Amino acid sequence: MRNSPFWWVFIGFMLLLDFYFFQALKTISQTANPKTRLIIYVSYWTISATAIIILIVLPHLQFEHQARLIRNTIFACIAGLFFAKLIASVFFLVDDVRRVIQFIALKIFFSNTKGQVLQQGEKISRSIFLSWTGMLMGGGLFGSLVYGFRNKYRYQLRRFQLAFENLPASFRGLKIIHFSDIHSGSFTDKDAVHRGVQKILDEKPDLILFTGDLVNNRHDEMNDYMDVFNKVNAPLGVFSILGNHDYGDYMHWDSEDEKKQNLEKLKEVHTALGWRLLLDENIVLEKEGEKISIIGVQNISGKSGFKSYGDLQKAYAGAEELPFKILMSHDPSHWDSEVRIHYPDIDLMLSGHTHGMQFGVEIAGFKWSPVQYIYRQWAGLYLEGRQKLYVNRGFGFIGYPGRVGILPEISVIELV
């Protein structure tokens, strides 16, 4: 991507954004003395130029696993600066549009016979208020992203009951741990991850379901964490599926065969952990002569930007007559695109994938994240008729090494 035309267009856009932001910076610093203004200007361009240079050279640098935190933190800071300037520039743009409209109005309605604008319209200055508002909004965004670095291992237990009329009596009270999106290649603190896993074990669940994205790209990202996640177990078993990142689609491989071998080795990782990886198949759980089905599909997306590998028809085969069905499908967009339309007897679907964008707001009775403009179902519980979908906010993280408002989640579900 770094050699593509889009990459250089993006770099160019960043430069234009820097120059545009600088105009507002000059406005709010105009009352400072010359020496202070010089310090502000030099500091601004030093930071901006350094960010662009790092952004250009960073993809060419090779980092050992231990240095990934440094790389990800640097990248997150640069991304934070970019979005902070972008948000601030929205306010600057509003002000500039105001100035243009005011100028045109003065030109049309308050000109003398010679076509000269009246004195009051000769100079329309940039608004100090809007400039400061933009700066504060951008600075608030950047500050929240920096603060979010400390939240990436703050695992939250979310407990709730789900009621189903057709749930067999022997499965009432079944305690399920649902977690998703480990992304082991992003981890840098093994002790913190172990504490998260211990939270799972302390719940003593009957059943554990993992809904994909064990790694970012490569199977060997799990090497340092096998002795952590192999402790995840439950009396009725641990079942897992693959997510979009598990297929290795987001990195360069020397050959297609190397990519396929990586996927096969990742499947072996699931086996070595003691997890039963469901690849377009279903299994039957039985208690006291009653049965329910756990259906697991490979990644299926209802979004055009993601590849689909799974086959729900194949996975569903044989489960038709069972009274209660749980589907594990990584991408929640699969619910609207296929599950609700063609499989109305799937009672509960469990997903992950979105991470809640690792950024948003969640308070009592209200939640918001930019990801909701892409995914209709992006975090928490959704109901359509008798069917239910739960989207886990993710155990791990990727890209931005932190979380703001949307914390890592371990879901504790009781069926009643």
Image (spheres, grey):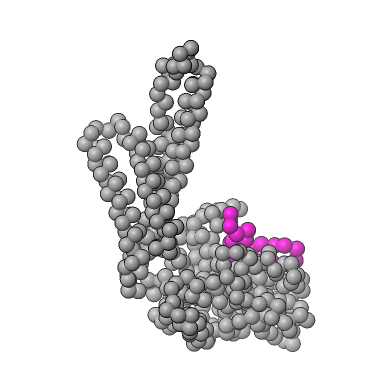
Apparent side of residue 404 relative to residue 176 in the rendered image (left or right): left
Q: Residue furthest left?
A: 35
Q: Residue at x 33, y 54 (%)?
A: 51
- Looking at the picture, how far across and down is residue 171, in whole percent? 70, 79
Q: Residue at x 32, y 71 (%)?
A: 62
- Observer able to see residue 150: no
Q: Residue at x 31, y 56 (%)?
A: 53
Confirm whether the magenta stretch covers residue 69: no
Confirm whether the magenta stretch covers residue 382: yes
- Looking at the picture, how far across and down is residue 209, in whole percent? 58, 77
- Quarter of the rendering occupied by the N terminus: bottom left
Q: Residue furthest top?
A: 113
- Observer able to see residue 237: yes
In the displayed structure, 43 sits above or below 116; it is: below
The number of callouts visible is 0
Q: Tell me the quarter of the picture where residue 119 sits.
A: top left
Apparent side of residue 371 relative to residue 34 in the rendered image (left or right): right
Apparent side of residue 215 relative to residue 81 in the rendered image (left or right): right
Q: Residue at x 60, y 75 (%)?
A: 309
The residue lying toward the viewer, choosing from 319 and 298, is 298
The residue lying toward the viewer, choosing from 188 and 215, is 215
- Looking at the picture, how far across and down is residue 97, in whole percent? 49, 34
- Looking at the picture, how far across and down is residue 110, in whole percent? 50, 17
The residue lying toward the viewer, choosing from 395 and 166, is 395
- Quarter of the rendering occupied by the C terminus: bottom right
Span highlighted in magenta in the image: 373-391
Apparent side of residue 15 relative to residue 87 in the rendered image (left or right): left
